[in-house]
Image (tube, rainbow, N blue to C red):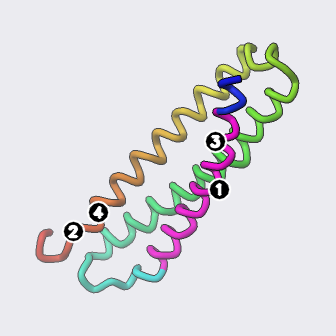
């Protein structure tokens, strides 16, 4: 039961994650020529947003889809070694997304005067 509830939460979270990732990359594309920041900071922010978007797409369309398929096969499919590895990899991807988002957040406070 708890696994099914968590799956439902992750499916809903996936939509939010993709929305935030797309919004983030759009913001970075339009603010790339920001004169208050150096090229290095602007490029770093853009690349972080791109990484976040790529990993979000991977999480939603690969990991979540795999977990949903495994759960539809029954409880035995969620206890296999392959499922455990995929689930662990999805946790790592989510941690990288969160860390990248935190770094991106703090990069927004840098200005040319600070550098």
Per the rendered image, the range of residues in magenta is 6-29
Say which element carries label 4: helix
36 relative to 97 in the view: left or right: left
The answer for how far apart the CA atoms under marks 4 and 1 are is: 25 Å
Instruction: Work out whether residue 32 or residue 11 is closer to the camera in this orientation and state it.
Output: 11
In the picture, the quarter occupied by the C terminus is bottom left
Instruction: Work out whether residue 35 or residue 25 is closer to the camera in this orientation and state it.
Output: 25
Counting other residues with Cα less than 10 Å from the Cα at mark 1, is it few (<14), some (14-19), or many (20 or more)? few
57 relative to 99 in the view: left or right: right
Q: Which mark is drawn over residue 110?
A: 2
Q: In which image quadrant can residue 31 be found?
A: bottom left
The answer for how far apart the CA atoms under marks 3 and 2 are is: 33 Å
Counting other residues with Cα less than 10 Å from the Cα at mark 4, is it few (<14), some (14-19), or many (20 or more)? some
Q: In which image quadrant can residue 42 be found?
A: bottom left
Relative height, residue 49 to residue 29 (above, below): above
Q: If you read the primary sequence from the N terminus, does the residue marked by circle 3 or circle 4 appear first?
A: 3
Residue of label 4? 107
Residue of label 1? 15
Relative height, residue 79 to residue 4 (above, below): above
The answer for how far apart the CA atoms under marks 3 and 1 are is: 9 Å
Q: Which mark is drawn over residue 61?
A: none
The answer for how far apart the CA atoms under marks 1 and 2 are is: 30 Å
Relative height, residue 104 to residue 91 (above, below): below
Contact (Cβ within 8 Å) of mark 2 with mark 4? yes
């Amino acid at each position: 039961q708890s696994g099914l509830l968590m799956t439902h939460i992750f499916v809903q979270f996936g939509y939010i994650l993709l929305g935030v990732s797309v919004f983030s990359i759009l913001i970075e594309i339009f603010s790339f020529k920001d004169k208050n920041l150096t090229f290095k900071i602007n490029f770093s922010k853009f690349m972080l947003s791109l990484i976040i978007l790529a990993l979000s797409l991977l999480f939603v369309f690969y990991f979540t889809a795999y977990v949903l398929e495994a759960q539809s096969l029954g409880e035995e499919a969620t206890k296999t070694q392959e499922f455990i590895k995929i689930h662990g990899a999805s946790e790592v991807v989510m941690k990288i997304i969160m860390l990248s988002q935190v770094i991106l957040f703090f990069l927004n406070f840098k200005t040319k005067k600070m550098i």
